[in-house]
Image (spheres, grey):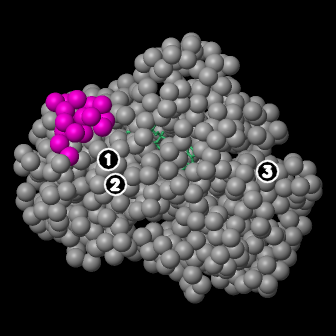
């Protein structure tokens, strides 16, 4: 029997809409959903390799309970009842001794969080965390400091944009399929891309302008551009007069930061900075300065991101076609949003263990900060945490200092990992619960915000063909065992969908037709001179931020030049390959075949000084000497002399993943001592404040 099912891709976290062809209970074909115009059949390599993941038996297939020491790799197979009872008994003992706040849960963010967040809240713990300290926290906080709301306030209207400026936002490789398509169209219709990176990543190859910037100096570049805009009065006066406070203070602050000064810092000629600024002002307001997603990770990346937002404001690109568009939700379409289980459960009274939102007032409480969580775990301050559930998240691979992390994790009485693969963290856990893959499970419905808000659905295409289970089932079963089953009264996921859709006017049947329901026919635009709403105390875009100032932080931070690495040492930069997702696809049979390991990009001149030739094996050593490894050199002019680069996620250490095991090097193992180093205004861990030495092997 043949059928077509609409699903949401889970091979990375950008969640493209897909259509899956199933024949006789087997997945045969995956393509971008035809009902989503941005996808129209298209998919990336990782998305296509979903089938290879589905039928790969080198991923967890049964619940496992640890037998040997943590991380030793000795496990016993358990039934679901056994594993869930084991977890529930331990959690109950922890809660009895230390209170519910001694249980924490972290995930990888995203729109499918309602059930597991509800589970934690039902237990009574405030300690929900996600991955964002290593991803977009600086950008999130930069947005809050200006607009009073986070980075998801805006979407980027590439389809009408005339000039997009990207700081290490490698859109054509670190991709969203939809955006990559639209950006290629942008180029075809004569739009411009200025791409700024320490190396010529894939996007640089297509860009109309590429600036190879000195590492860690994007903030200086922005100051030079802002200086030019204000000096030459190139900003959108009407927009700025209407919405902005603090322009005069900004003018005073940037007065010493001339393009000539910026040129010395960044290595980009002053004449080019001036020429670029005029060009961009001409294209305004259809311009986008991308404030970064991961961006570069330095101690002042918050200010680099904040000034990128300020550049959009000065160009008046907010809610302008081709600029930064306010994301509209169901309410803006005159409808009602999805019901959330989380809203039905009382908020715990305890304060977060990581201090976010109270001790560290500059940081949103929301998902907290992993590095502060680890510190609290180690010091048992302000209180002990003894149970930790890691769901769809691999902290040991995605944060620095795995050995320090392990010391913190050793304070736990229970570490549970719920994963579709053997993650590095799962391998260290006490119990590993195998999660069904996205093709084998239905998830809670989610909202797609934008000019045309929608509801989106992931429906399972086949039943799990191993003993893995869907997330909703795992958390419902755990909730029942923990005595909080009254919140999880739905029979199955379809029953939960009905609860989510109650009062919205949309039915489950409507959702199943195409996997999404648009809540409006016409795109929703607001009048950018009248109807914008900013959630700052003043209702304005606050260049002088009342939030930052109240927290004792500067709205305009004097620039500090990053130190140049010593001879023979380099900053270690990292990024993505278009064919891998972080560390979770290195063992995928197809993707492994396309890219089995990473290489080390090194500048030709620097390689010459060290007598390193292209394709030589080289030794890379961490700054404190604690870690070293060999890797193939890729000698190229396309990288800045102060830096070397490797793709993130390789050097996997799980012997049961025979393909990915020990192939290539792991960037994070060189980031020694950085678990504690972060941007104090933005909270983002400064992963690129990392130097390594390189020598011929
Ligand atoms: N050194 C260094 N560190 C980095 C980065 C870097 O480039 N270099 N990148 C940073 C960034 S931007 C991010 S976002 C983080 C990413 O942080 P990670 O936590 O590494 O994120 P992912 O690899 O997306 O996925 C986490 C886990 O989810 C599992 N998973 C996948 N699908 C499912 C599923 O359906 N169910 C369940 N339960 N599990 C599933 C995967 O197997 C994986 O183990 O890492 C950050 N850390
Ligand atoms: N194929 C694929 N796509 C993905 C993901 C994936 O794992 N695989 N993950 C998704 C996730 S979670 C995220 S957060 C995004 C991340 O997407 P991006 O934000 O595009 O980040 P990266 O790919 O990590 O690339 C970071 C770039 O910053 C550059 N860089 C380093 N230092 C500097 C500097 O000082 N200045 C500038 N301007 N650049 C610098 C690096 O050379 C690198 O090219 O990608 C998403 N898309
Ligand atoms: S970018 Fe590729 S892997 Fe990521 S969700 Fe889209 S199709 Fe899937
Ligand atoms: Mo990310």
Q: Nearer the viewer, residue 490 or 89?
A: 89
User: Where residue 278 sits: x, y (%)?
Assistant: 12, 38
> CA–CA distance between discs 1 and 2?
6 Å
Report x, y in % for residue 447: 45, 63
* Residue pointed to by mark 1: 219
Mark 3–mark 2 Cα distance, whole angstroms, equals 37 Å
Element type at marker 2?
helix
Across and down, in percent, residue 477 comes to 76, 72
Give the residues in magenta.
Answer: 257-273
Q: Which of marks 3 and 2 is nearer the N terminus?
A: 2
Of labels 1 and 2, earlier in sequence is 1
Quadrant for the C terminus in the image: top right
Does residue 116 appear in this view? no
For the residue with label 1, is its CB less than 8 Å from the closest atom of ligand 2? no
Of helix, strand and loop, which one carries label 1? helix
Which residue lies at the image location 39% right of the left edge and 52% below the top edge? 300
Q: Is residue 508 left or right of residue 105?
A: left
Q: As drawn, which residue projects farthest toward the front?
A: 566
Residue at the spot 50% in from the left edge and 56% down from the top edge: 678
Residue ID at (9%, 64%)? 241
Q: Name the residue under label 2.
A: 303
- Disc 1 to disc 2: CB gap under 8 Å: yes
């Amino acid at each position: 029997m043949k059928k077509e099912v609409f699903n949401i891709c889970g091979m990375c976290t950008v969640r493209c809409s897909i259509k899956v062809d199933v024949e006789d209970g087997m997945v045969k074909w995956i393509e971008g959903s035809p009902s989503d115009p941005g996808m129209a059949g298209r998919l990336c390599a990782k998305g296509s390799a979903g089938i290879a993941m589905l039928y790969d038996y080198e991923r967890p297939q049964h619940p496992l309970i640890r037998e040997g020491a943590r991380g030793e790799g000795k496990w016993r197979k358990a039934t679901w009842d056994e594993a869930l009872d084991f977890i529930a008994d331990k959690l109950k003992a922890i809660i009895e001794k230390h209170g519910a706040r001694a249980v924490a849960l972290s995930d990888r963010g995203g729109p499918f969080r309602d059930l597991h967040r509800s589970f934690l809240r039902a237990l009574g713990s405030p300690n929900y965390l996600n991955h964002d300290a290593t991803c977009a926290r600086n950008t999130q906080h930069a947005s809050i400091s200006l607009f009073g709301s986070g980075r998801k306030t805006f979407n980027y209207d590439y389809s009408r944009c005339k000039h997009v400026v990207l700081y290490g936002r490698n859109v054509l490789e670190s991709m969203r399929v939809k955006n990559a398509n639209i950006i290629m169209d942008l180029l075809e219709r004569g739009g411009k891309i200025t791409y700024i990176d320490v190396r010529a990543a894939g996007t640089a190859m297509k860009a109309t302008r590429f600036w190879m910037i000195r590492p860690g100096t994007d903030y200086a570049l922005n100051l030079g551009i802002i200086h030019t805009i204000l000096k030459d009065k190139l900003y959108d006066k009407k927009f700025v007069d209407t919405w902005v406070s603090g322009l005069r203070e900004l003018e005073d602050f940037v007065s010493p930061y001339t393009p000539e000064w910026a040129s010395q810092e960044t290595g980009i000629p002053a004449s080019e900075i001036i020429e670029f600024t005029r060009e961009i002002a001409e294209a305004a307001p259809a311009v986008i300065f991308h404030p970064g997603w991961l961006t570069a990770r330095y101690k002042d990346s918050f200010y680099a991101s904040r000034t990128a937002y300020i550049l959009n404001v000065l160009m008046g690109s907010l809610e302008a076609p081709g600029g930064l568009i306010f994301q509209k939700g169901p309410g803006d379409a005159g409808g009602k949003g999805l019901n959330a289980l989380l809203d039905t459960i009382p908020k715990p009274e305890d304060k977060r263990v990581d201090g976010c939102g109270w001790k560290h007032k500059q940081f949103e409480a929301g998902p907290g900060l992993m590095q502060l969580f680890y510190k609290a775990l180690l010091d048992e301050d302000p209180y002990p945490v003894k149970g930790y559930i890691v769901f769809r998240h691999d902290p040991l691979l995605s944060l620095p200092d795995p050995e320090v992390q392990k010391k913190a994790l050793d304070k736990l009485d229970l570490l549970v990992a719920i994963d579709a693969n053997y993650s590095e963290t799962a391998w260290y856990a006490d119990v590993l619960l195998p999660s069904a893959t996205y093709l084998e499970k239905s998830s809670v419905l989610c909202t797609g915000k934008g000019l045309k808000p929608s509801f989106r659905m992931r429906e399972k295409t086949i039943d799990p063909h191993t003993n893995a289970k869907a997330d909703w089932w795992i958390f419902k079963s755990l909730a029942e065992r923990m005595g909080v089953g009254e919140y999880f009264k739905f029979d199955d996921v379809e029953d939960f969908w009905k609860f989510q859709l109650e009062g919205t006017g949309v039915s489950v049947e409507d959702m199943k037709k195409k996997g999404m329901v648009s809540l409006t026919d016409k795109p929703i635009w607001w009048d950018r001179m009248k109807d914008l709403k900013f959630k700052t105390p003043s209702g304005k875009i606050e260049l002088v931020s009342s939030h930052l100032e109240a927290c004792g932080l500067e709205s305009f931070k004097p620039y500090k030049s990053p130190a140049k690495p010593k001879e023979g040492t380099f900053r270690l930069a990292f990024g993505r390959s278009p064919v891998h997702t972080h560390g979770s696809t290195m063992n995928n049979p197809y993707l492994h075949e396309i890219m089995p390991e990473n290489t080390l990009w090194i500048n030709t001149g620097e390689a010459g000084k060290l007598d390193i030739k292209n394709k030589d094996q080289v030794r890379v050593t961490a700054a404190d000497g604690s870690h070293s490894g060999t890797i193939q050199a890729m000698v190229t002019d396309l990288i800045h002399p102060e830096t070397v680069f490797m793709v993130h996620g390789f050097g996997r250490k799980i012997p049961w993943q025979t393909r990915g095991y020990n192939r290539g090097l792991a960037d994070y193992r060189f980031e020694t001592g950085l678990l504690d180093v972060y941007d104090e205004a933005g909270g983002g861990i400064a992963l690129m404040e990392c130097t390594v030495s390189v020598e011929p092997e």
